[in-house]
Amino acid sequence: MASIRNHAERHNAEVYRDYKKDRKVGEGAYAVVYLGRQLSTKKVVAIKKIKIGQFKDGLDMSAIREVKTLQELKHPNVIELMEVYFHKTNLNLVLEYLESDLEMIIKDKSIVFMPGDVKHWMLMTLRGLDHCHRNWILHRDMKPNNLLLGRDGQLKIADFGLARDFGDRNRQLTAQVVTRWYRAPELLFGAKEYGYGVDIWAIGCIFAELLLRNPYLPGNTDMDQLDTMFRALGTPTDAEWPGMQSLPNYMQLNRYPKTPLRLLFTAAGADTLELLESMLIYDPNRRISAREALLHPYFYNRPRPTALENLPKHVRDTPEEAKLKRKAEALGA
Amino acid sequence: MHQNKLSLQNALLTLEQLQRTPSREDGITEEQEDDLRQFGCHLIQTAGILLKLPQVAMATAQILFQRFFYQASLRKFAIRDISIGSIFLAAKVEECPVRLTDLANVIDHLQKKFRRSPLDPLVPFGQEFYDLKNAVVIAEMQILKKLGFNVHVQLPYAIMVNYLKVLELTDHPTIPQRAWSFLNDGLRTSIYICYQPPTIACSVIWLAAREAEVPLPTNPAWWEVLDSNLEDIENIAGHIKSLYYKTLPIPDLPLTINEVEPYLQKQKSIALALADAESRTGKKKGQDGEEAEQAPVQGGDSGSVVPPKNTRVSRFS
């Protein structure tokens, strides 16, 4: 049976034939993303094409990390890696396709958020993240842009290009992770050992952004990020964050007083602010975990999370639809 | 190997895959294949030490190497290229990436050492240097392709340490170290592609305790508590012990693809000459044509574990 030898290649060819790329929808640092279809099921998928030959150092680390972690994680709130196949010198990852992301929704000012909407998005984000953390995986790039939203309202965590396992005290991690606005204070101080706290801090920032409809801590540089953070949340004291001064890049910065969150978040309820506050605790060891957050009264109290199908959606028009709309508008005017 | 699905569990071979490897179908004998696989693993382990890689990366690399040659023939892919490609990829998978330049230098050094040629350093930015770097990147891609991106490897090291704790053997003067070394050496055999990590962990402890003459609970048998059975344990132990009964003829083994054919030719003529000599002296033909070539290394060690004649494979689907 000659088929044994070519098992992987035959399978690869079968998979390759089953998917068709339709159009380019985006370009990342190391990959091009296409909208595609699985021919056998007619399912719409995203195909991430990673060019290998292009890089001097072989296959990019982030591609390896993404495949490795997504293999481990199967959860309704984590994007699903459906297949992996090669074509010529390109590696293709077939992922679930989701229409929009949280960033689009936040920026679409025509949408009004109800408190229940924010609650359900937070719930789904935390469920997905809790699943990652239970499997000892840090995402390390949580931001609205990486929280995808499906047509059915389901939220899924995506982009695991920076993800890695944690919990091994002997191994040092790099502090150069997470998009700046969502970067935890310990990372800004150059911590080489950290844990789930970095993802929780980022979620805290996203939570605040959902409430404000604007980025909460938009620093211009890494230094400015700390300043912006301290201005908003007060400069941490030794008592608040023991061990802060022994971090590699620690430095004395401007002292700002602590201002209560409710001065900025005027419309938010007490339980909302309490949860937000526990996510934005300076000391990473005292910061709430994803599992604890899921048990927070905020999620039991009224208002209830909005039903999936009623969550706001950012409907992206196809070029044809957009054309028709413009025509209709012109006619109406 | 079941590669239709990406899986967290180690992919295990079917009996058919183990018996009819691509190399075997390409006219390479079982013994030659074992030698060549061991050589590749030896290369990975030695290079890994020079590169100061953690053992997990070297272990992952050796398992990737082994898996690869159940999908491809040793006649078509060079041992050197696939070994360094495996190191390069495994180091990334285990989050301790190596620089291509370091890898090229180390492999060139080892190549010269194995060939017993003068140990001149590789000319920086010379043609040879670029060729080596290129070969690594290509090999990495080949491995990913042939393995269908199944680069996830479960290792038995941590499990073994836990089992030692359960058996209260962590403070024994020889058992932990010996069991650990058996795990390292076992990477050169097919055990990691035939058994799941817990069974392998049980086996190395069983073997190390046996050699140290330390009795372990038998009623109920300790391995049963750890969900393993004696047959598998003995089989794995046999594979590991069989490594110590022969030396690898390193200077003769092919590193690059150009060296493969001359090596196979030479092996063939030696086998023929041996058979000829035997028939002329009227001696009874041995079971193995090349037995005379390999002298046992550890003649004194007459362990009770005999290398198994037939290989039992556990199936995983």
Image (cartoon, rainbow, N blue to C red):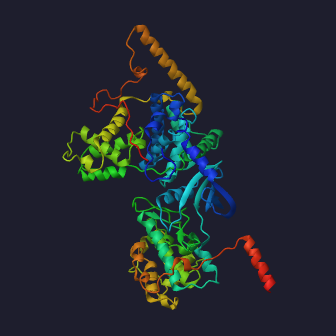
Furthest residue toward front: A41
Q: Residue at (49%, 59%) from the top-left corner?
A: A69
Q: Residue at (31%, 26%) from the top-left corner?
A: B299
Q: In the displayed structure, would residue A260 be above or below residue A136?
A: below
Q: Where does residue B289 sit, x and y in percent of width and height?
A: 43, 20
Q: Can residue A7 be seen in this view?
A: yes
Q: Can residue A194 be seen in this view?
A: no
Residue nearest the viewer, comparing A148 with B139 = A148
Q: In the displayed structure, would residue B40 be above or below residue A69?
A: above
Q: Where does residue A276 sit, x and y in percent of width and height?
A: 46, 81
Q: Residue at (52%, 84%) from the top-left corner?
A: A231
Q: Quadrant of residue A323?
A: bottom right
Q: In the displayed structure, would residue A76 be above or below residue A171?
A: below
Q: Where does residue A212 sit, x and y in percent of width and height?
A: 56, 84
Q: Where does residue A72 sit, x and y in percent of width and height?
A: 46, 59
Left or right of B244 in this view: A218: right
Residue nearest the viewer, comparing B301 with A137 = A137
Residue nearest the viewer, comparing B103 with A26 = A26
Furthest residue toward left: B219
Exactly how many numbered labels are in the figure? 0
Q: Residue at (53%, 21%) from the top-left corner?
A: B266
Q: In the displayed structure, would residue B289 be above or below residue B177?
A: above
Residue nearest the viewer, comparing B62 with A44 = A44
